[in-house]
Image (tube, helix red, strand yellow):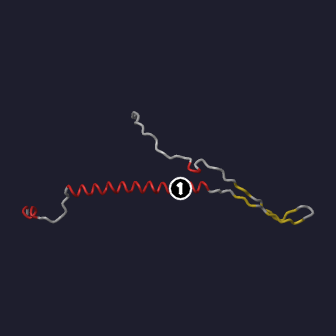
């Protein structure tokens, strides 16, 4: 049984070359995913800027139906409305999202 085990050449042998190739592939994958992440964040920022630049103001008039012209009575009416879009804090890409500087932990207490 030991002779069969020693002479057996079937199976996968992990060698230094395979570990090196796998390491290089994983590092390349991490760099590629990082560049994809930066591209997606840039495109989402463009969409946010475009949305912030759109004017969302509106207005519409009301209408009325007079029943008695002499006394000024109304049979039905609705009021108009208006909304004015003002500039928000982060419109036109004015906000910077960044990480804070790392700080050391304080002493632990119970």
Apparent side of residue 39 relative to residue 68 in the rendered image (left or right): left
From this view, report whether residue 33 is shown above or below residue 68: above
- The x and y percentages for residue 2 are 8, 61
Residue under the image location 89 percent in, 61 percent down: 72
Question: Is the N terminus in the top left, top right, bottom left or bottom right quadrant?
Answer: bottom left
Q: Compare residues 14 and 2 and report the one nearer the observer.
A: 14
Within-10-Å neighbours for mark 1: few <14, some 14–19, many 20+: some
**Which residue is denoted by mark 1 in the rendering?**
46
From this view, report whether residue 74 is shown above or below residue 49: below
Residue under the image location 90 percent in, 64 percent down: 69
Q: Compare residues 25 and 64 and report the one nearer the observer.
A: 25
Residue under the image location 25 percent in, 57 percent down: 21
Apparent side of residue 32 relative to residue 50 in the rendered image (left or right): left
- The x and y percentages for residue 48 are 55, 55
Apparent side of residue 54 relative to residue 6 in the rendered image (left or right): right
Q: Residue furthest right?
A: 70
- The x and y percentages for residue 62 are 78, 61
Apparent side of residue 62 relative to residue 25 in the rendered image (left or right): right
């Amino acid at each position: 049984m030991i002779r069969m085990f020693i002479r057996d050449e079937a199976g996968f042998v992990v060698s230094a070359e395979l570990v090196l190739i796998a390491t290089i592939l994983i590092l390349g994958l991490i760099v590629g995913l990082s560049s994809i992440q930066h591209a997606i964040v840039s495109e989402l920022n463009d969409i946010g800027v475009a949305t912030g630049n759109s004017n969302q103001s509106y207005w519409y008039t009301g209408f009325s139906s007079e029943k008695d012209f002499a006394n000024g009575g109304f049979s039905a009416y609705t009021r108009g409305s208006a909304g004015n879009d003002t500039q928000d804090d982060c419109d036109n890409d004015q906000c910077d999202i960044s990480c804070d500087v790392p700080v050391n932990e304080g002493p632990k207490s119970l």
